[in-house]
Amino acid sequence: MRALIHRLGGALLALGLWGATAQGETPVGLRYQLLDVPGGGSAHLLTVDRERAELRVLDARDYGGKALTVQEFAETTGATAVVNASFFDVDGSPLGLLIVDGQRRNRLRSVDWGVFSIDATGADIVHTREWEDGPTVTQALQSGPRLVVDGKALTLKKQSARRTAVCVTGEGAIKLAVLPSTTAAANLAALLEGLGCTDALNLDGGPSTQLHLSRAGVVVDEPGGWPVPVALGVFVRGAAEIQGRGGCGGCLP
């Protein structure tokens, strides 16, 4: 695995990114794990608790570039963690539906993909033909294929690549998986099914697959082969994030 992982004081990799409460508790907003993948290889897994962290679609055009690495996205936006997201054309233009902070950037593309979206009620993944826009949708992107539907892994083509995926669980959590080794889509789907994902969507892969996470001295950096125009950023909420970083690195504005 090419990932650069710094540990602070021998910190366990399966760690929580948290903020201490007045009662001394440590509610988890973002949890990172390094897991084995069925069929071989490893996966970086981020689990986002939407009550304590926000997941946002990031568009490089909002930050002065056509494409950025996920580390550049993180450093520019203050996100705690960033992964690559949807597909893009040869000229670097994002492909498929794209909604950023409630603003529609791209129209829905009529292809056999899926749509990942976030609104006031939670996160969802549906087939392109089932997508219904609404005034409360704040974030959305289109990609494919879908990997898990109604809790069951789908039958997928036998293609292998570095991979990135997003899934939602029955408890309302969002999981982001980054697989830096060449992996069959079926193995990724099996992993996500086993993790309790009710629905999962394949994102862009190959050289696009990348992850950057930085929090309280722990850095996980999985570089990609090139910058990407669209990414998914995780922003952990709360004053404790300020105390932990000595600033507002991963806080919401």
Image: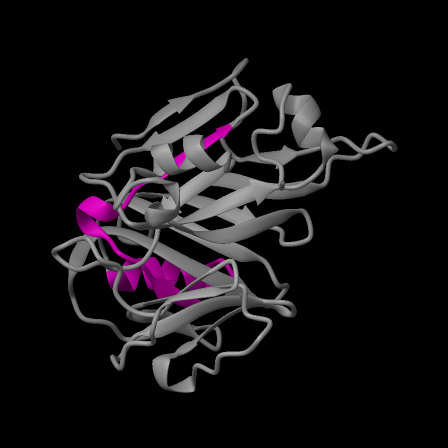
Left or right side of 230 for 194: right
Task: Note whether residue 16 is visible.
Answer: yes
The location of residue 208, given as percent across then percent down, is 23, 47
Q: Quadrant of the N terminus?
A: top left
Task: Note whether residue 35 is visible.
Answer: no
Q: Quadrant of the C terminus?
A: top right
The location of residue 134, given as percent across then percent down, is 54, 78
Residue shown at 34%/46% (left/top)?
60
Q: Using the rendered view, name the quadrant where residue 15 is placed.
A: top right
The location of residue 113, given as percent across then percent down, is 30, 75
Between residue 37 and residue 84, name the one nearer to us: 84
Residue extending furthest toward the right:
23
Residue shown at 28%/49% (left/top)?
229
Between residue 13 and residue 223, name the one nearer to us: 223
Left or right side of 2 for 54: right
The location of residue 31, given as percent across then percent down, is 56, 41
196 in the magenta segment: yes
In the rendered image of this protein, does residue 20 appear above or below residue 157?
above
Between residue 47 and residue 54, name the one nearer to us: 54
In the rendered image of this protein, does residue 22 appear above or below residue 189?
above
In the rendered image of this protein, does residue 120 appear above or below residue 65?
below
> What's drawn in magenta, residue-wise?
185-214
Residue shown at 36%/57% (left/top)?
165
